[in-house]
Image (cartoon, rainbow, N blue to C red):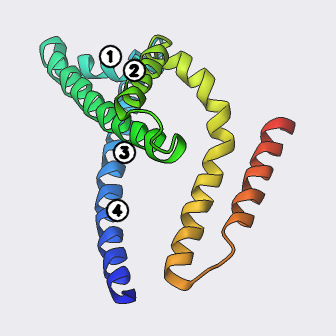
Amino acid sequence: IEKDNKKLLSIAIKASSIGLLLLALVYVAFIKLSAFYGSYLTNFSGSEILSNLSILILGKKAAYISSTIVALACLTTAIALANVFSDLVYDKILNKKIKYNYCLIGTIIITFLLSILNFDGIVKILAPILDVIYPSLIVISIVNLLHKLYGFKMIKTPVLITFVLSLAYKIFF
């Protein structure tokens, strides 16, 4: 079993490295384009920059195509996340006490209500929360890997310490 775990981990690391490389290339391209066209983008908010950048580079007709591609990518991601979240609520939080469809409908309603806020409104709500939670999520990922690979036992303590330090930093600084 341990040999299978190491092989699976090796495959996961290779796949993650490919994803990391591709994502890094996309971000480097965005950085170069934003630096080159930065003077044209100064009057736009964060959520408007990408669409206006595509209009500048591709023209209006091709920008419609790229906007459609981005919208479809967001839609497929939203569908997958709604499914995963509904499954989590149904299975782990509510212990299958209500129907899965009700969990999915609740998820879609919450998603719709959040979508009304637009990008900037969502960022205003989530940024302070994520500033505190993200460091803990990174630590829990690292300690879980250490647990799987080397039998590292102390998982909760580093995560709790990271959470408390992140919260204190957010409150006092």
Choose top left, top right, bottom left or bottom right for residue 173. Answer: top right
Above/below status of 100 relative to 4: above
Looking at the image, which residue is at 19% across and 21% down?
68
| Residue 111 place in picture, x, y as percent | 43, 22
Above/below status of 163 relative to 34: below
Residue 16's tag is 4
Say which of 21 and 140 sits in front. Answer: 140
Looking at the image, which residue is at 25% across and 33% down?
76
Looking at the image, which residue is at 29% across and 52% down?
22
Q: Earlier in the sequence, mark 1 or mark 3?
A: 3
Q: Earlier in the sequence, mark 3 or mark 2?
A: 3
| Residue 100 place in picture, x, y as percent | 37, 35
Residue type pointed to by label 3:
Val
Q: Are marks 1 and 2 in contact (CB under 8 Å)?
A: yes
Q: Nearer the viewer, mark 4 or mark 1?
A: 4
Residue 28's tag is 3
Q: Earlier in the sequence, mark 3 or mark 4?
A: 4
Q: How many marks?
A: 4
Report how far apart the C-alphas of labels 3 and 4 lie in the structure. Answer: 18 Å
